[in-house]
Amino acid sequence: MHMDVLKITGPINYTKAGEYLRNLPEIDNLNNQKKYFVGGTFSIDIIWFWLNQNKFSGLMFWFGLENPGIDQKYFIGLEPKFDFTYKSEDINNYKPEAYNILVPGNRFSFSLPQNRDFIKFLKNDKQEAHLLDGFVDSSKMEEYRQNFLQDEVYGSVQKSGLAYFIDRVELQDQEISMIYKFIKQEKVKYIRYYIGYNEKDLDYELRLILIPVDQMGKNIVLNKNAVEDSTTLLQYSWPPNPTGQ
């Protein structure tokens, strides 16, 4: 069981994240010109507060589409889970529950030319820093999620509209808080998400990638001169299946 849990939430590096972005479908190949190339930035403050609450279990991210047919750029909403155990057999019953769902104070889109260095892009990306995130109530977030799931393109590559990041895993008889480890990196002020793509999991190709961000709004890179950077990014969430890394 512990090995499965470890595979559900664990670290990746910029090299792996770049691979996921490189796999995104070319927009020109999509018959309705959907934009996969979107991201958003959350302030760390409220996430840090959640993390320090009793029985914190993890972070549930919800895929949402506000204005189908008009604004075709989806976004990610976020809520904490407490005393919660994810069960794959209940996936069709999960929906936003928190009174307020956190939505990113900064949303952005970007373009990636075919021959772009995806790893370099992620390491150097800088977006507007902001002070406050927003909120929507759980019923509205569920409405947005249903818009996403009913979309012809988005709903075909992410059939649950969620990505859950478990906090605590056991490794070598020691319990580790993966989210705490992630946000305790060098002066993390924000968490930024990007969407990658992996065809191994046919129902859940879209991959949510979390990157630490500094107070100036720039993605954090540790050991800049190292051949293999040691910055911790988070990606392994449920779904997709933990065996389909």
Image (spheres, grey):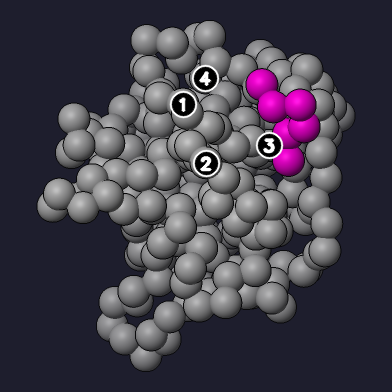
49 or 229, which is in the foreground?
A: 49
Residue for point 47% across, 72% down: 185
Question: Within 10 Å of the Cα at label 2, are there few (<14), some (14-19), or many (20+) other Cα atoms?
Answer: few
Task: Tell me if residue 155 is in the magenta stretch.
Answer: no
N-term mark: 4 or 2 = 2
Q: Residues within 10 Å of mark 4 (few under 14, many from 20)?
A: many
Q: Is residue 98 magenta?
A: yes
Mark carried by residue 72: none
Tell me if residue 132 can be seen: yes
Tell me which label, 3 or 4, sits earlier in the chain.
3
Q: Secondary structure at mark 1?
A: loop
Q: Amino acid at mark 3?
A: Gly
The disc, 1 or 3, on the residue closer to the chain's N-terminal end is: 3
Which residue is under mark 3?
Answer: 77
- Magenta residues (range): 97-102
Residue, disc 1: 84
Residue at mark 4: 160
Query: How far apart, in angstroms, are the residues tagged by discs 3 and 4?
Result: 14 Å
- Ranked by sequence position, the earlier of labels 2 and 1 is 2
Q: Position of residue 151 (x, y in %)?
A: 67, 19
Mark 3 or 2 closer to N-term? 2
**Going by the image, does 184 lie left or right of 95?**
left
Q: Position of residue 216 (x, y in %)?
A: 71, 78
